[in-house]
Amino acid sequence: MIDIKDAPPRHARWISEASTARFARFADQARAPAGDVTAQRAHYDAINSVRLDVAMERYPVAIETRSIGGVTVHDVVPRQPARGTLICLHGGAFIWGAGAGALLEAVPVAATAGMRVLAVEYRLAPEHRFPAAVDDVLAVIAALREARDEPIGIYGCSAGGVLAAQVVARLIAEGQQPPAAIAMLHGSGVDVGGDSLATAALLNGAPGDIRRLHDLSYFDGTSPTDPLVFPGESAQGLADFPPSLLISGTRDFAASSVAVMHRRLLAAGVDAQFVLFDGMWHAHHVDTDLPEAQETHDLLGHFFRRQLSRA
């Protein structure tokens, strides 16, 4: 028996050596400064800038930053893009993750899916509160639909996965057409909780300082049972969700919430699939040199090519 009180369990033999080595180095990384939002954003942007350089070497794309619907987006285009546009919603607890982080999550998917990806610079807390980010994404979607008739897919990681679900729920509530497909990685339409929240710190050998998403400042003044805040709380709303891909890892604190969202989508009759990566941590795919990250991006590319070709 492994005593995870002393050290996290070793990775299984099917985990790549690169991921095992990367995981071992996490404990030595500097932690984000507490309480200073500006410093936190700079901290994560520096990390993501290094990761983005790695991604750009592997995934050739063209990037243009511009405004769509009054919202800043990074327009990421691969060689010979296929019909359809994907909207990428970055993670970062609704506080950080803009800039390099947004591009980092868009570049690999644009290349592997062979589709244009718009990484949206949605408004963040503490300057803004729910539903500011949802409103920004809806403005981009409205402008896209006015400009051209083509299928749209949405995906996001962590906070971006939650936001993706919120955007779909708003479109449905307002009687608008939902996207052709949606992917939620390491975050979903269900608040963080369950066994994964309790065990992730032990499995990762890190302090247990992760809290519920609803405790974040972005959600001040909202109810955790509001289906526009956490769409997984409404079976009726989920019934109209498009085909969905959900991804997490066994060492991800959000794994339980993603799994529950998958079950609720299935119960609502939605075409939904859930891929769980053994031994992987929260947002493992942003380290694009790892085999498991590349597998994740291949899954996303295949999923969106298939679904948008049917739309």
Image: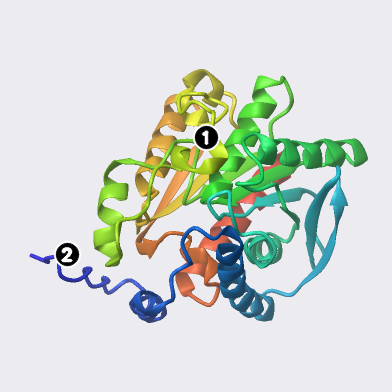
Q: Secondary structure at mark 1?
A: loop
Left or right: 7 as drawn, with respect to 88: left
Residue pictured at 72% horizontal, 53% vertical: 121
**Amino acid type, residue under disc 2 in the picture:** Ile
Residue pictured at 49% horizontal, 41% vertical: 188
**Amino acid type, residue under disc 1 in the picture:** Asp
Residue 216, image x, y percentages: 49, 43
Q: 58 and 67: which one is in front?
A: 67
**What number is the disc on residue 4?**
2
Residue pictured at 34% horizontal, 55% vertical: 209
Q: 69 and 224: which one is in front?
A: 224
Q: Quadrant of residue 242?
A: top right
Residue pictured at 65% horizontal, 79% vertical: 53
Q: Is residue 295 visible?
A: no
Which residue is the site of mark 1?
Answer: 271
**In the displayed structure, would residue 272 be above or below residue 95?**
above
Left or right: 189 as drawn, with respect to 278: right
In what quadrant of the picture does the N terminus appear? bottom left
CA–CA distance between discs 2 and 1?
Answer: 37 Å
* Total numbered circles: 2
Which is more N-terminal, label 1 or label 2?
A: 2
Q: Secondary structure at mark 2?
A: loop
Outermost residue on the left side: it is 1
In what quadrant of the picture does the C terminus appear? top right
Q: Residues within 10 Å of mark 1 (few under 14, many from 20)?
A: some
Number of the front mark, 2 or 1: 2
Q: Is residue 204 visible?
A: yes
Residue 183, image x, y percentages: 57, 46
Left or right: 28 as drawn, with respect to 296: left
**What number is the disc on residue 33?**
none
Q: Residues within 10 Å of mark 2 (few under 14, many from 20)?
A: some
